[in-house]
Every structure is written in C-alpha cells, then in structure tokens.
Image (cartoon, rainbow, N blue to C red):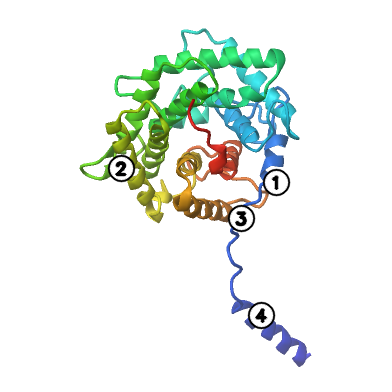
Amino acid sequence: MHRLILASALSALLAAHAPAAPPQAEPDLRRPLDWLVAAQNDDGSWGDGVKDPHPDVATTALAGLALVRLGHTGSRGEYQEQARRAVTYIAAAVERTPQEEIAINPPGTLPQRKLGRNIDTFVAAQFLAEVLPGLRGPLQARAERALGSVVRRIERAQAQDGSYSRDGWAPLLASAFANNGLYAAQRAGARVDKDVLAKGQSGLVNKYDDKTKTFGVSDSAGVQLYSVAASVMAAAQIAQSPSAAPEAKKHAEEARKAGGAALSNENVLRGFGSYGGEEHVSYMLSTEAFAKSGGDDWAKWSKSIRTRLASIQRGDGTWRGDHCITSTAFCTAASLITLAIRPATMPNPN
C-alpha cells in the first residue's frame, strides 16, 4: 500500500514538473471545412451556427469565398454543389432588391451592426467575382448579372473621401470589403468605374499619415489593427496597378512598410484585445497584402499568422469571436480564407 501511495505521489510530482506541450504551429483545415459545409442551410445560406434559421448574405458570401479559395468552385472540388447553392442564394437576394437600394439584406444582422448596413453588398461582390470563372451555363449568367448589380450599388455608396461606410462599429473594414469587391469585380471582367476604385484605394491608404508615421483610427473603433489591415491591403493593390501615379505608389509603399512594422507588434495584432470577427477579417486582409508582396516578409508573416490561428482554434476545429462579431461561421470562414492564401493565389490586375 505504501509503495502504491509513493508511486502515485511520484507520478503526480513528475507530471507537475513536466514541460508543457509545445503550441500547435499548424492549424487543422479539414475539420473547420467540414463544419462549415455541414452548417450550410438547404437554400445555400449561412448564419451563425449549424443550419442557422437566421442567415445573412455577408456570412454566406464569406463562407462561399472560403470554399472557392480552398478549391471548391462552381465546377470542381468536393463541395462544388455547396458553392453553387451559395451563388443561388446571393443572386436571389440581389434580384429581389430594387436597384436603387444599396443594401441587399434586411436590416438587423450582426455583421451589419458591427460593419455597417451595406456590408452584405460589399462581401457579395467579392464572392461573386471570384466564383464567377468556375460557373457554367445559366448560373454563370445569373451570377454575372448579380455582380454587375452589386458593383453599381457599391459605386453609389462611395463618399467624397473615398469611403463606403460610416455606420457600424468599425466601418473602415466595410470600406475595405467594398474596395476589394470592386477590385475583384474588375479582375473578373465586370465594368467598374476606375476613378471610383482608385479613390477608394486612396482613401484607405491615406489612413496612413507619412508625417506622423501613424494610422488613423477614427472609423476603425479606435483599433489600430483594423486601420493597418485595410491600408496595407489597398497599398498592395496600388503597388500592382499599372495606372497608379508615381506619387500614389510612393505613398502606398510607405504605408505598406509602416504597416508591416506595425503588424510585427503584438499589441497591434491583438486588436481590440481579444479575437472577434473584426480581428479575423483583419488577419485575412493583412495576409492578402503580404502575399501580394511575397519574399521574406511573406514567409515571416505566414508562419506567424498560422501559428496564431492554430493557438486559438477551438476543439471542434472552428473559430469563434470573443467580442462583436462572435459568429462561428463568419470567423471560421475568414480564418479558412487566411490559411488558403499563398502568393501564387494573388492574381495581378488586368
């Protein structure tokens, strides 16, 4: 008996002093992808959780974009049917909304409260643009018409300073989505007003003040991460634009370098202080910016962000927000997009 007690005590002592398991460096992709597919409603939509009865276009578009980025397009991949259903849902939302209205989803959703009333329109543009090349037949034509419709709506939403949103908790991120939607639509062959696109990119990059060497946070809920992410993404687009003026390219390069330095600061990377949907989409925007640049900066950032996402991945493989946009589907989709990004996946502008 004494020997058993002694052995038990020794085991407990050794366990207490055993080295902690090293943090996971590589996130799991299969489980969150399977969860996302299982969460989709029969009509092609997504809400917060599995088969959520209150879906929204923004979450559906982000989830659909995750499928496309992971190789599940409208005509190939294990989940091509799920991608097509997402297109059908979003196209229907566009078709039933009068063209004079910018918002294509009824009011009151969580993404709208945090990113602005028109966030559904903005994210829909990027998804439709990226899924379009993989579609075939009548659905392709329907998606093309829907994309043209949301492009016109986004162009009308732009303000004099180049922003697209002033409502919500962090409207700057909505402006970044609007800009990305137009940028993707242009690549997909849609007719986009180049002046509107350039003005939107400039408005985002101008959040960086080259005199004070800081990023403005007036419309990013006071959170530097959101402003940096939006600025560096637009800066990367300007850097690749053959029509951008030399002065614009110079300022964009300064913003990109300053943003890269800021994103190496843990205090900036923690955003609001915990991981909400806004942090997840900021990581997505930042990763796309680094991928466009490539090189050592990309390699360092990619390793860092993958380790970070692995460390906060939940037991079932998903990600969920700790504040603001808490939606599991929204955060999981954004993280899957981030993990799918590689330099080769970032096309140059037409």
Q: Residues within 10 Å of mark 3 (few under 14, many from 20)?
A: some
Mark 4 or mark 2, earlier in chain = 4
Determine whether, in the image, residue 115 is placed left or right of residue 78.
left
Mark 2 — residue?
Answer: 254
All told, the count of numbered labels is 4
Mark 1 or mark 4, earlier in chain = 4
Can residue 102 be seen here? The reply is no
Quadrant where the image shows the N terminus: bottom right
**Residue 59: image x %, image y %?**
57, 30
Q: Residue at x 68, y 41 (%)?
A: 33
Mark 1 — residue?
Answer: 31
* Quarter assignment of residue 164: top left
**Residue 289: image x %, image y %?**
45, 40
Q: Which mark is residue 26?
A: 3
Q: Which mark is residue 243?
A: none
Mark 3 or mark 1, earlier in chain = 3
Q: Nearer the viewer, residue 199 or 307?
A: 199
Q: Residues within 10 Å of mark 4 (few under 14, many from 20)?
A: few
Mark 3 or mark 2, earlier in chain = 3
Mark 2 belongs to which amino acid? Glu
